Image (cartoon, coloured by chain):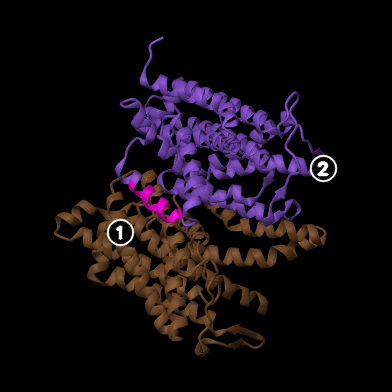
Chain colours: A brown, B purple
């Protein structure tokens, strides 16, 4: 039982990372109707900026600040230079141009930081573990990640439903010509939304830094998981991103942990481990396929 | 026969590929033969992708999945032939190209049928993300296949056998690839000019109208997806033979992206264009890598600029008015 709770927390933590990624991406999809493969690059940029700042100053808060600023700046520059031209183009052009961006970003990080992965330490004040329940010891850092994710979700909810900017963003998703005609500066709005999405990705990147290695190409694996989240949740829907991210996080973690033991009951050991490992990494895609059969537009489609 | 600019370029291309080996041998540049063998195999995969992108308007970002399936069929059959074991307990291995290659094509086509049937329930951005996700699923599946090398891949000690030919011989293998690529492209050109191709293009231009005519466009698209998957599977089988090695890298989405780049560089919806695109891509990779290991940092922006500024790819530029984009 304790083990189950621990694994649920791990799943929750992966889900939070995926939520930070997919919230930004789903906004870009939903509002600008543009498919952006380079979103994983902002995650990578955030992680690299954070790791470098951490190594130079030793301060984790500064590292987070650097990651947010670096990713947001990169996002806005990319929006102005490349994405802006792509809004009215076909999806194929968007895919290819952002694929070019990925190649560029990955190679650039290799030139700047080399091929060796960087490692970030957990800051001392977030190090160690606490006993959540009798017998359940959990790392504080992972709890902090979950806490930040929940805070960001609340902030986004507040931003979208209680502020003027949020209202404009929602209106822009509904009908961009109309909101332009009402005198809202759409170009600026788009750049801001894109920067916000990149910033969230950068936050996810820097928080993943102490858990995973920071290396070139780290953004692509998470990007594809993010796509799965968005397909499950429905394009353009923050609520869908929350539900999809948690679902994917939990199913992925649980599959990896419990499938091998399930298989061991049925098959011989070595064979069971091999098959279970394969199936566990496929679990979320099977989940996605099942949801597609049931609801082709995702659980919470924004434009239904 | 009326000679158009397009015909001239196509016949010129055929002549070029046919004469390349003797000319390369004459100048002692034997590596060119292997390079162009690889280019033709990639071209085969790119042409099959062009059926999807250019004619069906199905933007699949998971085409490498079918290349990988084809390659793994060859690799796994070889593995079982080598240690005389049985796959699933009843399928024996084989090294015979006449058995293994059709099997690779068939299995890839079946994979495309399943993935296509699921993915075609959606369209637009969903379709792009879902094809990518399914390809990635197969990638992780291959990584987890410990029996067949898992992450490290599956080496083959020699190429498949083909009666009367020696596939290990550079020249023989070159002309086998040339033959298969030509046949596939010929079939594709017939296909897109048939009623099937017309429906496909009609559905991508005006779906509502095609449906109003009583045509179930999704089943046409699915058939197109399966044919493209089969073509990619054949390319995978050849690629496995060429490198005598099969690895999860063949299923990686990076390869899907590269195939897409080849199609667009060469000319979308032209079938011959992707061949040019594949050759150009491999040549660039080969020669830029001599000057800098970081060639991607230049290639990325070039790709973006090409996308943002050109409309018809190289083939379109060569042919003039003929190669209209998107068919």
The image position of residue B128, as x and y in percent, is 45, 47
Residue highlighted by disc 1: A79
- Do tags 2 and 1 sit on the same chain? no
Q: Measuring 52% from the left and 22% from the top, which residue is drawn there?
A: B186
Q: Which residues are magenta?
A: B295-305
The subunit letter for the residue under badge 1 reads: A
Reply yes or no: does residue B302 show up in magenta: yes
The image position of residue B161, as x and y in percent, is 75, 31
- Dot 2, crowdedness within 10 Å: few (<14), some or many (≥20)? some
Residue highlighted by disc 2: B82
Do we see residue B206 in this rendering? no
Do we see residue A31 in this rendering? yes
The image position of residue A242, as x and y in percent, is 45, 66
Please tell me which residue lies in front, A292 or A203: A203
Please tell me which residue lies in front, B150 or A261: B150
Reply yes or no: does residue B210 show up in magenta: no
Q: Secondary structure at mark 2?
A: helix
How many numbered marks appear? 2
Q: For the residues marked 2 and 1, what is the alpha-carbon distance in whole angstroms? A: 54 Å
Q: Is B158 positioned to the left or the right of A286 in the image? A: right
Q: Is residue B189 above or below residue B72?
A: above
Dominant SS of magenta comes to helix
């Amino acid at each position: 039982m304790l083990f189950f709770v621990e694994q649920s927390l791990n799943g929750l933590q992966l889900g939070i990372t995926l939520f930070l990624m997919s919230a930004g991406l789903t906004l870009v999809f939903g509002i600008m109707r543009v498919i952006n493969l380079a979103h994983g690059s902002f995650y990578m940029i955030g992680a690299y900026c954070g790791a470098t700042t951490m190594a130079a100053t030793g301060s984790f808060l500064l590292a987070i600040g650097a990651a947010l600023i670096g990713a947001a700046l990169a996002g806005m520059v990319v929006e102005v230079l490349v994405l802006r031209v792509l809004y009215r183009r076909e999806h194929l052009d968007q895919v290819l141009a952002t694929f070019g961006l990925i190649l560029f970003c990955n190679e650039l990080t290799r030139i700047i930081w080399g091929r060796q992965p960087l490692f970030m330490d957990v800051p001392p004040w977030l190090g160690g573990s606490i006993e959540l329940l009798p017998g359940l010891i959990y790392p504080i850092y992972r709890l902090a990640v979950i806490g930040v994710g929940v805070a960001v979700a609340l902030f986004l909810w507040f931003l979208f439903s209680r502020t003027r900017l949020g209202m404009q963003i929602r209106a822009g998703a509904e009908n961009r010509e109309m909101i332009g005609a009402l005198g809202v500066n759409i170009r600026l709005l788009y750049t801001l939304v894109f920067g916000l999405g990149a910033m969230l990705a950068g936050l996810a990147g820097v928080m993943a830094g102490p858990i995973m290695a920071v290396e070139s190409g780290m953004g692509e694996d998470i990007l594809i998981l993010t796509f799965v989240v968005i397909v499950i949740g429905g394009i353009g829907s923050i609520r869908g991103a929350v539900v999809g991210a948690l679902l994917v996080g939990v199913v992925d973690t649980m599959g990896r942990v419990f499938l091998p033991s399930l298989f061991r009951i049925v098959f011989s050991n070595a064979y069971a481990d091999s098959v279970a490992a394969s199936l566990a990494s496929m679990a979320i895609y099977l989940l996605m396929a099942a949801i597609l059969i049931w609801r082709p537009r995702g659980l919470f489609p924004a434009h239904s | 026969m009326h000679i158009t600019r397009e015909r001239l370029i196509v016949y010129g291309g055929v002549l070029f590929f046919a004469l390349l080996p003797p000319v390369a041998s004459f100048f002692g540049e034997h590596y060119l033969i292997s390079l162009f063998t690889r280019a033709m195999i990639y071209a085969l995969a790119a042409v099959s992708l062009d059926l999807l992108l250019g004619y069906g308007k199905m933007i699949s970002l998971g085409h490498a999945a079918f290349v990988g399936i084809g390659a793994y069929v060859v690799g796994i059959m070889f593995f079982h032939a080598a240690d005389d074991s049985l796959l699933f307990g009843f399928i024996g291995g084989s090294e015979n190209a006449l058995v293994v290659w059709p099997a690779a094509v068939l299995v890839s086509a079946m994979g495309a049928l399943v993935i296509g049937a699921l993915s075609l329930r959606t369209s637009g951005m969903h379709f792009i993300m879902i094809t990518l996700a399914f390809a990635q699923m197969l990638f992780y599946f291959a990584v987890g296949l410990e029996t067949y090398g898992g992450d490290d891949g599956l080496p083959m000690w020699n190429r498949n056998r083909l009666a009367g030919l020696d596939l290990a011989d550079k020249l023989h293998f070159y002309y086998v690839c040339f033959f298969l690529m030509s046949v596939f492209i010929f079939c594709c050109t017939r296909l897109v000019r048939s009623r099937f191709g017309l429906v496909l293009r009609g559905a991508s231009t005006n779906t509502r109208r095609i449906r109003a005519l009583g045509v179930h466009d999704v089943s046409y698209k699915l058939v197109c997806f399966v044919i493209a998957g089969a073509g990619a599977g054949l390319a995978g089988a050849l690629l496995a033979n060429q490198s005598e090695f099969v690895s999860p890298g063949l299923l990686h989405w990076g390869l899907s992206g590269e195939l897409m780049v080849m199609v667009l560089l060469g000319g979308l919806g032209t079938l011959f264009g992707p061949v040019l695109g594949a050759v150009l891509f491999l040549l660039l990779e080969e020669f830029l890598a001599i000057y800098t290991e970081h060639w991607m940092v230049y290639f990325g922006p070039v790709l973006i600029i090409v996308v943002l500024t050109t409309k018809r790819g190289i083939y379109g530029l060569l042919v003039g008015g003929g190669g209209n984009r998107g068919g």
